[in-house]
Image (cartoon, rainbow, N blue to C red):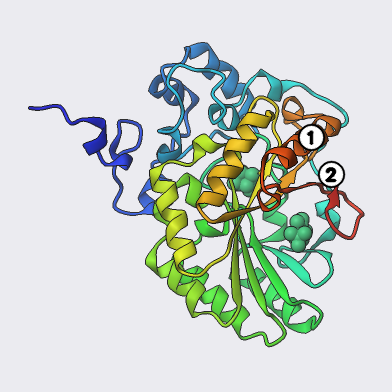
Amino acid sequence: MPLLSPATVPLDCRLTAPCYPDWRAALADAVRDPTLLCRLLKLPPSLAETAKLGAKGFPLLVPRPYLSRIRMGDPSDPLLLQVLPTEGELIHSSRFTTDPIGEASSTLPGGILWKYQARVLMVTTAVCAVHCRFCFRRHFPFEASGRDGLHWEMALAKIASEESVSEVILSGGDPLCLDDEVLAGLVGRLDGIPHLLRLRVHTRQPVLIPQRVTDALLKTFRGSRLTSILVLHVNHPAEIDRAVEEAIGRLVDAGVPVLQQAVLLRGVNDGVDVLTELYQRLVDLRVMPYYLHQLDRVAGAAHFEVAPEEGVRLIGELRRRLPGYAVPRYVRETASAPNKVPLA
Ligand SMILES: *Cc1c(COP(=O)(O)O)cnc(C)c1O
Ligand code: SF4
């Protein structure tokens, strides 16, 4: 049998990322076992042993389309570091806590976070298609805030009763882990609340499982009275392959403004060259850089922290290299400020 050249192999059909009938199948087939991950990526089995310790409270989870972008045999690959628990996760630091930005106290019944004027954040699901090791909600009390139909009713009732709210942010977990019908139902309900103007979706899904950008999803966005805005979490240019480019293109072509946010992460994207490349790639895909977040001090993530002074220096260098619109706002989230606090 003739060997297919890489160019003729459909992107999602490489060894580590088989073709899936739909995004649900890709989610179900995500890698959850550190030993399997290390075998697929030709990494030393000893890394899997460490990973098992780190994964205890927050299991490993990587969908294969994302896995296919990780370099084989490279323990310091910037995508791998985001998903594989390393020794750093076992370091305990009293300055890194389970609720670094005081979300527990601003969570209302129904799983809504109302910290800022005019916009509320709705925790729609605890599910993500990946477990980012630096995730600030890795210890979030999802069970207590609830995410079944009843809790949504409470959230919707609260939003409907607060006329000062003009924007709802769907977050999680990842709201695009909800099925299209469920999402369409929720958006339909929000649509019916007269004082709402905008719907924002914070997601990483198009980067994890690009197949998630379905026609039904685009129809939901297009069919709503609300202005839909998508904020995509992308940290590194290597996260963007052809399939991701195409998924982003479909969103933008459908008229959905796509903004981007990243977390500044030691060993992943804390260099001016990598950030320059990231922001150039994004604007060329018609995605506008929005926020670069200073890491929230969540327990288990201390090894990812970059000093704010270093972040400020990086932003200064980006300003020299890039057009103004390609430079994100470098911000920190705090428990008490009425907005995200600009650092640069
Ligand atoms: C980040 C965030 C928002 C949105 O803030 P913007 O500055 O409008 O992007 C809203 N609510 C909560 C709880 C947030 O953390
Ligand atoms: S996609 Fe977002 S919410 Fe989900 S694990 Fe990663 S950082 Fe956390």
Q: Quadrant of the C terminus?
A: top right
Q: Which residue is mark 1?
A: 311
Q: Residue 191's mark?
A: none
Q: Quadrant of ligand 2?
A: top right
At x 44% / y 47%, what residue is drawn? 244
User: Can residue 58 be seen?
Assistant: no
In the image: residue 228, left or right of residue 70: right
| Residue 100 percent across, percent down from the top left | 82, 42
At x 68% / y 77%, what residue is drawn? 156
Amino acid on which the number 2 mark rests in the picture: Ala
Badge 1 element: helix
Vertical position of residue 85 compared to residue 312: above or below:
above
User: Can residue 283 be seen?
Assistant: yes
Q: Nearer the viewer, residue 98 or 114?
A: 114
Cβ(mark 1) to ligand 1 < 8 Å? no
| Residue 258 percent across, percent down from the top left | 57, 59
Q: Which residue is mark 2?
A: 344
Badge 2 element: loop
Dot 2 and dot 1 residues touching (CB under 8 Å): yes
Q: Can you tell which quarter of the image residue 198 is in? A: bottom right
What is the crowding at mark 2: few (fewer than 14 residues within 10 Å), some, or many (at least 20)? Answer: some
